[in-house]
C-alpha cells in the first residue's frame, strides 16, 4: 500500500519531510489557511481524508476556536431566523418531506439561510475571553455562498478595560468566485 500527502489549497507552498509516510512533518511557506489530503492506495482501492491547517502570523495567538468535529454538536452556537422550514409535498405515489440544511460535522457548521436579512448566528454564552491589553482583535469567518455582505455585532460585558481604544478586524473570506 502506498500513501501520499498532497496540498489541495493553500496560501503558499508546503514541504513534507516525507510525503510518502502517513506520519510526517510539514513546513508551510507563509501564514494562511491550507487544506491537505492524505491518500492511501493499494492499487485497487484508495481512501483519502483531509485536514485543514491554519498557520498564524508571528506574534498572534488564538483566543477561541470551534472545530465542529463532533457530529451534530454546534458547540453552543445557535442559529436564529434562517428563513428555512420543513416543507411537505403531496404526491399520490411519492409524498416528500424536505428538511432545512443544518449540519455540523467534519470541521464545518453548515446552515441554509433563505431570504432573511435578520438571520444570524449567536455565539455560545460567556465565551470568557481575556482581552485586556489587546490592541487588535481579529474574527475570522468563511462564506461559501453568493452573499457578499454580512453584519457583525460584537458585545461585551461592562468592563473598564474596554474603555481603551481597541481595533476590531474582520477577516471575511468567501469560497465563491
Image: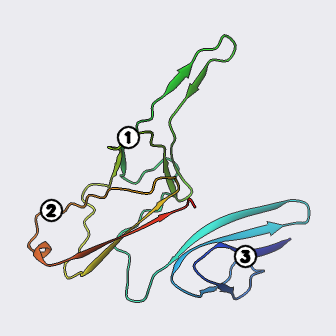
Vertical comparison of 100 with 59: above or below: above
Q: What residue lies at 26% left-to-right and 69% top-to-bottom? A: 129
Residue most extreme to the left: 160
State the image coordinates of residue 16 (x, y, percent, origin top left): 69, 85
Number of the front mark, 1 or 3 = 1
- Indicate the secondary structure of the residue bearing disc 1: loop
**Image quarter (top left, top right, bottom left or bottom right) of the N terminus:** bottom right
Q: What separation in Å lies between label 1 and label 2 (alpha carbons)? A: 28 Å
State the image coordinates of residue 20 (x, y, percent, origin top left): 78, 80
Total labels: the figure holds 3
Q: What residue lies at 73% left-to-right and 76% top-to-bottom? A: 5
Label located before the other in sequence (1 or 3): 3
- Write down the quadrant of residue 157 in the picture: bottom left
- Indicate the secondary structure of the residue bearing disc 3: strand
- Indicate the secondary structure of the residue bearing disc 2: loop
**Which residue lies under the disc numbered 3?**
5
Assess disc 3: are there few (<14), some (14-19) or many (≥20) residues with their C-alpha within 10 Å of its C-alpha. many
Label located before the other in sequence (3 or 2): 3
**Which residue lies under the disc numbered 2?**
157
Amino acid at each position: 500500500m502506498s500513501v501520499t500527502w498532497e496540498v489541495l489549497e493553500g496560501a503558499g507552498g508546503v514541504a513534507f519531510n516525507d510525503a510518502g509516510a502517513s506520519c510526517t512533518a510539514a513546513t508551510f511557506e507563509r501564514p494562511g489557511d491550507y487544506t491537505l489530503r492524505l491518500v492511501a492506495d493499494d492499487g485497487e482501492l484508495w481512501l483519502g481524508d483531509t485536514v485543514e491547517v491554519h498557520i498564524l502570523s508571528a506574534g498572534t495567538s488564538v483566543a477561541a476556536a470551534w472545530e465542529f468535529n463532533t457530529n451534530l454538536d454546534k458547540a453552543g452556537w445557535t442559529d436564529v431566523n434562517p428563513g428555512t422550514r420543513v416543507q411537505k409535498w403531496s404526491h399520490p405515489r411519492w409524498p416528500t418531506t424536505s428538511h432545512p440544511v443544518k449540519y455540523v460535522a467534519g470541521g464545518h457548521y453548515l446552515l441554509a439561510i433563505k431570504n432573511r436579512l435578520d438571520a444570524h448566528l449567536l455565539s455560545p454564552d460567556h465565551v470568557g475571553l481575556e482581552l485586556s491589553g489587546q490592541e487588535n482583535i481579529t474574527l475570522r469567518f468563511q462564506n461559501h455562498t453568493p452573499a457578499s455582505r454580512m453584519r457583525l455585532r460584537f458585545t461585551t460585558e461592562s468592563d473598564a478595560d474596554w474603555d481603551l481604544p481597541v481595533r476590531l478586524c474582520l477577516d471575511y473570506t468567501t469560497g465563491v468566485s
